[in-house]
Image (tube, rainbow, N blue to C red):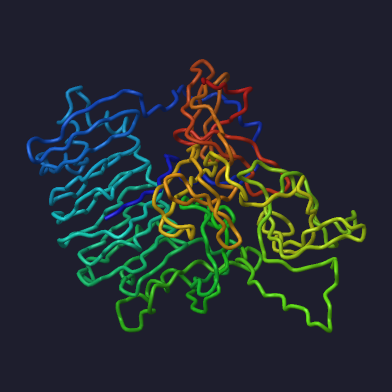
Amino acid sequence: MKWKFGLIVLGLAVGLSPLFGLGNNCNDSEAGHNSTIALADENTPDETYSGIIGSGETSVPWTLENGTLTLKSGTMPPFSGSLMQKRSGQLLYALQKGNSAGLTTTDFKNKVSKIDIANTLTLSPDSSFLFAGFKNVTDYSNLKNIDASQVTDMSYMFYANSALRTFTAPKFLDANNHSLANMFGLNQNLVYLDLSEIDSSHITSINNLTQACAILLVINLANFSSQNINSVDGFSSIFDTQDVVTDITLSPSIILNQTTVKEPDLSITTFTGNWVDVGNGNVTLLSKTPSLFYHNLPDNYLYYDPQGSTSFDSTAALFAAYDGSTSTPRGNVHYVLEPSDTSRIPGPLPVTPTPAPTPNTPAPAEPDTATSQPFIVTATKKIGFYSSKDFSTASRLAWFVPKPQLKQLTFTVIGTAKSTAGNARYQVRDTNPGSATYGQTGYITAQSAYITQAYYESAPKVVTVINPGGINDYNSAALKQPRTAYKQGTRLTIKKVVTHGATTRFLLTNGKYISANKHFVTAGQYKVPAKVQAKTAVNRYSTVNLTKKNKHYPKKTHAVFKVLGWDYSRGTSTTAAGTLRYRVAGGYITANPKYVKALN
């Protein structure tokens, strides 16, 4: 039994986008304006605590240090509190009873940001509401060490985990029938849920699985079995009626004709108005923390190119097809909203082998144009995009500005060429959806001073995770079945670089693999302040573009913020470089040294 959570702290109001900038660069809004007095949020102090839950054979030692709650080897005792106390969180109640420092359940809610199961932890039969109420937990590690062989109820298990953004479950082995009803209820920031690897043979209900998860976008229910699930009650209201699911993978055993979700806004020109299966196409997420602005496809997807033949004109029609009858679509099917022609993000081009020249037709010694296996490059300086390999003002289609590494603009190389003067060119397809020439082919310079490979070709000793959504490691270079999630800012030690197809991977010293994509990691150490203090009045915003102000900090408070990560505004713009922002509890603030100063 192995669990893996890819969790990113956000704690934001509805409407924020943690991955990329979506609006204007609001420099004028960086300084604060008059509002009510408020203090910066600091949820994870540096104290160290320890204690024991239960006693004797049913006891679990624990420690709490720098926000990480570590549960050591043991057996959870049966819950002894009231029903109201259980609903507030079994583990929270047990921790309150099992500490000598006088910490309350509220203290644990505020202090715990990570839970680590260090050794085998045997759960009690009733494990409902076990991890409920941990509002600041953003990472569960080593859940593979949980022994659930005695469990008969797992309902509401992660209820009210309001910082939970993503959840991925590998195969789950158990012995008794049990319910997953309301398992992720009231997780207001859950956007990605993958249960495709879970052993569902003993599950009796997934009723209200995502109750009040009003921003859920991506869900994977492939391979899900319904053999022990009541076809009416066990599948009723799987989703909340306010979920805006836009990317869903379904098993033929799933019954959805009794549940509804909020229909996406199909008036947006990004989509045609239909649901389609991916088929032989390619739909690949950039990370498992998709943006709430689901219609901005480049914020969420590396490729968005469904090629299936099955189509439904609404979510209701799609769900109606999954009614448990023999007419239900067979096999696991991945469905997405059909993109319009202008918003489609093409997948990798098929490679057509170039036939060898015959003896009677010798190949040119130095051709000025040649095809090549497609690969991706990024622009490190301002470059032009031209309709001809002979660059001129008349043939220039667009300018592309330089941007920070994690937002650098990309092009798929489909051939090489030389200008009349002998200068090397790349023939490319513009893969930047924010540009006026998106999807068009043309020419850019091949000079290494302006263009670089999108993937590292040599191995530095250390890399730092720079993707705002973090990255995962994997057991193989194919990068299937993610194992451990690493947050932005994590430093990883590299053993060597490994080629996989047209891309590269880094082999870590722990034997796991990660992507070598320069949008995700950077060579060496990348530092941002752990804390910053306001020098003037500042505002906090729900988006990286500093729109949707959600809090004001007057100058006299000199508010101190814990920096949870960083990002840049105007992430998809090809004409604006973007401005650095700090991600803090509750949103984003300026990183402008005129307004904030580093404390370390």
**115 or 502, which lies in front?**
502
The total of numbered circles placed on residues is 0
* Drawn side of residue 66 relative to residue 410, left or right: left
In the figure, residue 353 lies in which quadrant?
bottom right
**418 or 116, which lies in front?**
418
Indicate the position of residue 477 as horizontal and vertical percent values: 49, 57
**395 or 538, which lies in front?**
395
The residue most toward the left is: 56
The residue most toward the front is: 359
Query: In the image, what residue occupies the spot 81% across and 58% down?
Result: 425
Indicate the position of residue 408 as horizontal and vertical percent values: 66, 47
Query: In the image, what residue occupies the spot 26% across and 42% down?
Result: 117
Indicate the position of residue 491 as horizontal and vertical percent values: 49, 37
Indicate the position of residue 373 as horizontal and vertical percent values: 67, 66
Rendered position, 545 above or below 457: above
* Drawn side of residue 426 relative to residue 329, left or right: right
Rendered position, 253 above or below 484: below
* Drawn side of residue 474 relative to residue 533, left or right: left
* Drawn side of residue 524 relative to residue 324, left or right: right
The residue most toward the top is: 556
**513 or 320, which lies in front?**
513
Viewport quadrant of the N terminus: bottom left
Query: In the image, what residue occupies the spot 75% across and 44% down?
Result: 381
Query: In the image, what residue occupies the spot 44% across and 40% down?
Result: 10
In the figure, residue 475 lies in which quadrant?
bottom left
